[in-house]
Image (cartoon, rainbow, N blue to C red):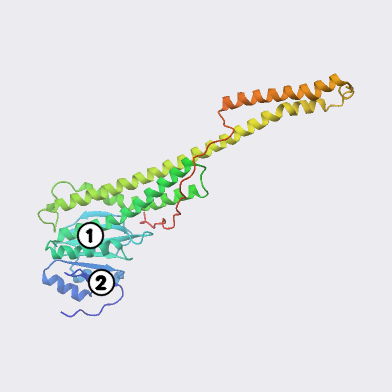
Amino acid sequence: MTIPPVRAGRAQLVEAAGVDSDINADFAALLLEAGAFFWLDLSGVPPERMVEFSAALDLNPDATQHLVDRDQRSSFTETHEGVRWVSYGVRDNSHLTQVRAVYTKSFLVTAHDQPCRGLADARHRYERLRDSEQDDGPLVLFMVLDALATTFESVLARLDAQLDELEAAVIGGPPMPGYLQQVLEVRQVLTPIIRAMGPYRRDLVSILGDVDRLPGMQAGTQQYLDSHRSHVMALFDAANDCRDETRDAMEAFSSSTSERQGEVINWLTIVAAVFLPLTFVTGYFGMNFSIITHLHGTLNFSLLAIVLPGALAAFTVLLLRFLIRRLGVHLIPTRVPRTSPISSMTESSIDGPQS
C-alpha cells in the first residue's frame, strides 16, 4: 500500500521496526480493516484532522471529543470499547505534556500537542517487544503509560538533591541570598506534578480485582496493571515527600533567621550593658554643680581618675559575665564552614495541567 501525503500536524504509525511513518485517515482505515493491532500517535494534529482519524477508526463521538479536548484532568477510565486515559509526561525537564489516548482491542491512539520524551522512549521499547513477539495490545498500552510515568523520576531525583543541599546550607551557616526563592521554585515545580498524577493514581487504585475483564484486555493483563500502578504510587509518594521537604526547608530558614535575630538582640544588650555605667558616671559628673566642679587635690584626683574608673571597669566585667552566662551568648560565635555552593535552579519551572 502506498502512503498518501499528509497535511498539518504529524500522524505517526509506529511500525514493526519501531519506525514512525506519516499516514493519513484513509490509510488508518486500511490498517483497521487489516485486523492487526497497531499504535497511531497524533502529534500536533489539529482538531479537524483528529475528527477525520476518529471517523476512519470508527470511534464514537465521546471518544472523538476525548482526543480533541485539551482541558482535561488526568484519568484512566473504562469504556464500552476499551480504555480512555489522560496522562502527563515530562517533555524537556521544563514542561509537562498532556497525552490523551483511546485503547481498543484493535489499536492504541495517542494524541498530544507538544513533543514528549516518554513516547519517544516507548517507541524504542516497542521495537524490542516486536523482536520478542510480545507486542500484544495490553502490553503496549501499559508500556506507553509506564514510559510516561518514568519521565518524572529524573525530575524528582534532581529536586530531592537540591532540597538536601539547601537544608544542609541553612544549617551550616547563614542563609544565602535567594534561599527562600529557590525553595519556592522547587515547590512550584512539584505542584503541577502532584496535580497531574493525583487523579490518575486514584483511578488506577480504584481498578481492583481481575483487570482482564476490561474491554480489549487479555489473560495475564493484571500483572501489567499491578506493576504500573505500583510505579505510579511510588512516584506520587516521592513527589509528596519532596513537597514535605520544602516545608521543612522553609521552617529551617525561619528557625535560622530567628536565631540570628536573637543573636543580634543579645549583642545589643551586651553593648548597652558595657556603656551603661560609663554613661551614668559621665552624665553625673558632667553636671555643673560647684561641689563637683571645684574639687581639687591629689586625693580627689586619685578617687575620681583612678579608683572610680577601675571600679566601673570591674563592675562592667562582672555584668558582662552575668549577661553572657544568662543569655548563653559566645563572644566569638562558631560557624560550621560551608562545604559546597548551592547549584542554581535554571530548569525548575514546569508548566502543569490546568486545574
Query: What is the spatial separation of the Cα atoms under label 1 and label 2, in whole angstroms?
Result: 17 Å
Secondary structure, mark 1, is: helix
User: Could you say which is closer to the camera, residue 220 or residue 324?
Assistant: 324
Q: Find disc 2 in the rendering and name its residue.
A: 11
Which mark, residue 211? none
Cβ–Cβ under 8 Å for marks 1 and 2 = no
Q: Is residue 66 visible?
A: no
- Label 1: how many Cα within 10 Å (few below 14, some 14–19, many 20+): many
Secondary structure, mark 2, is: strand
Amino acid tagged 2: Ala
Q: Is residue 33 left or right of residue 89?
A: left
Q: Residue at x 30, y 51 (%)?
A: 197
Q: Residue at x 44, y 53 (%)?
A: 343
Vertical order, 181 against 299 (above or below): below
Q: Residue at x 18, y 57 (%)?
A: 79
Name the quadrant containing residue 75: bottom left
The N terminus, quarter of image: bottom left
Vertical order, 242 against 80 (above or below): above
Amino acid tagged 1: Val
Q: Is residue 117 left or right of residue 278?
A: left
